[in-house]
Image: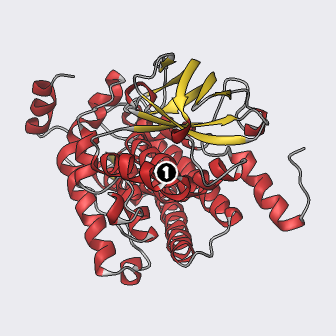
Amino acid sequence: MTEAEINSLKESGKGKDTYNQPDFYNIDDLLSDEHKMVRDSVRSYVKRELSPIIEECAQQNYFPSHIVKQLGEVGCFGPQIPAEYGGGGLDYISYGLAMQELERCDSGIRSTASVQGSLVMYPIHKFGSEEQKRKFLPKLGSGEMLGCFGLTEPDHGSNPNGMTTHFTEDGDSIILNGAKMWISNAPEADVAIVWAKNPDGIVQGVIVERGMEGFTTPTTHGKWSLRASITGELVFDNVRIPKSNILPKVTGLKGPLTCLNSARYGISWGALGAAMDCYESARKYASERHQFGRPIGGFQLQQKKLAEMLTEITKAQLVCWRLGNLMNNGKATPAQISMAKRNNVEIAMNIAREARQMHGGMGITGEYPIMRHMMNLESVVTYEGTHDIHLLILGMEITGENAFT
């Protein structure tokens, strides 16, 4: 879309956002003033800049790249990263609330921010050298640069240890070969955090920069999901990279898996945002749509659906709040994060489907957000660990037995 078309949509009043957050258990009472300020700031931005254009972006399979700098300005890139490195210097509940507000709008928009904050900025901050932090983090935090994260390969998804992307050494450089796919932000990314095997077969993280010869990022076409974000591949054909671009403070799968834990945490809040949006749309529709002489909200089956939606949302809100406190105290385990990601995405998918039924035929149109959320969540349930993989993570935690092999 052109800038004029985007401005026209914003001025038209189409897609006016009247969202009100469900809070049946007064969970706002558990939040600090800073938490609520962060949430309200992102919500205001979403209502003003994103809600008027998101349906058209999804319909056209268009990534509104102009929002990258906006997301940086509003503090959605690395809110949990220290301010001295270009992050927000906020706690994990603030980070979660920001992701909740973005995904309440659209999972693809939240994906853009999650990748930037948890999968690009986070590993550079945690595993990078001081020089790498100073060079990349401020520009990533401001949105001047966009990043992506390369772990998944065409033949290796849930089993990242089978990756074939590798590098050899050549003096002060490494030579990288291989490919990654299903990479959010890839076609427009300025930097990529790529996980590859070194000459000893051990996984290491490498910062690959746009413009390095042999590095290409073809776009993935034909998506029915996350249509307002951009997805692509990372292809490495003898890419020469200075050794100074290797992340020095981690080796092995611990590196990428630690990053995924941070991203999964954000997803648990984000999916809750999608569930809330579907619920609110259904609640409003139930009061506006009349059949048999009264609002459909007056019928028992519709009330049952709404009651069950609100119950699951309330439970998920409490899970997020408690997990956020555990994260703040450095006590959250990977299994606890897996439980939250898996549960909250599942309840969001179920709520989206029930809400779609409540909207009847209107539920499949772009006049309401339901079908877009449904399609997006089909990606969210798969990436950052599939639904079944998270079951196995929990199963191993419970029994002590590894069922992966």
Residue drawn at point x = 72 percent, y = 52 percent: 390
The answer to whether residue 218 is above or below residue 123 is: above
Q: Of residues 94 and 356, which is closer to you in this image?
A: 94
Q: Is residue 209 above or below residue 214?
A: below
Which colour style is shown? secondary structure
> Is residue 88 among what the camera can see?
no
Which residue corresponds to the image point at 62% horizontal and 76% vertical from the top-left? 331
Residue 116 is at least partly visible in this image: yes
Estimate the x, y position of residue 98 in percent, counting from the top left. Answer: 36, 59
Q: Quadrant of the C terminus?
A: top right
15 horizontally vs 293: left or right: left
Q: Position of residue 29 (x, y in %)?
A: 37, 83
* Residue found at the very far bottom of the displayed protein: 29
Q: Position of residue 109 (x, y in %)?
A: 37, 42
Helix, strand or loop at label 1? It is helix
Q: Compared with residue 61, is residue 326 higher up or lower down, i.e. above or below?
A: below
Residue at label 1? Answer: 124
Q: Amino acid at mark 1?
A: Ile
Q: Could you tell me how many numbered marks the image carries? A: 1
Nearer to the camera, 63 or 181: 181
Whether 310 is drawn above or below 247: the answer is below
Q: Residue at x 29, y 67 (%)?
A: 38
Location of residue 240 in the rendering, given as x and y in whole percent from the top left corner: 54, 23
Characterize the local packing of mark 1: few (<14), some (14-19) or many (20 or more) Cα atoms within 10 angstroms: many
In the picture, measured across the screen, residue 330 lies left or right of residue 357, that is: right
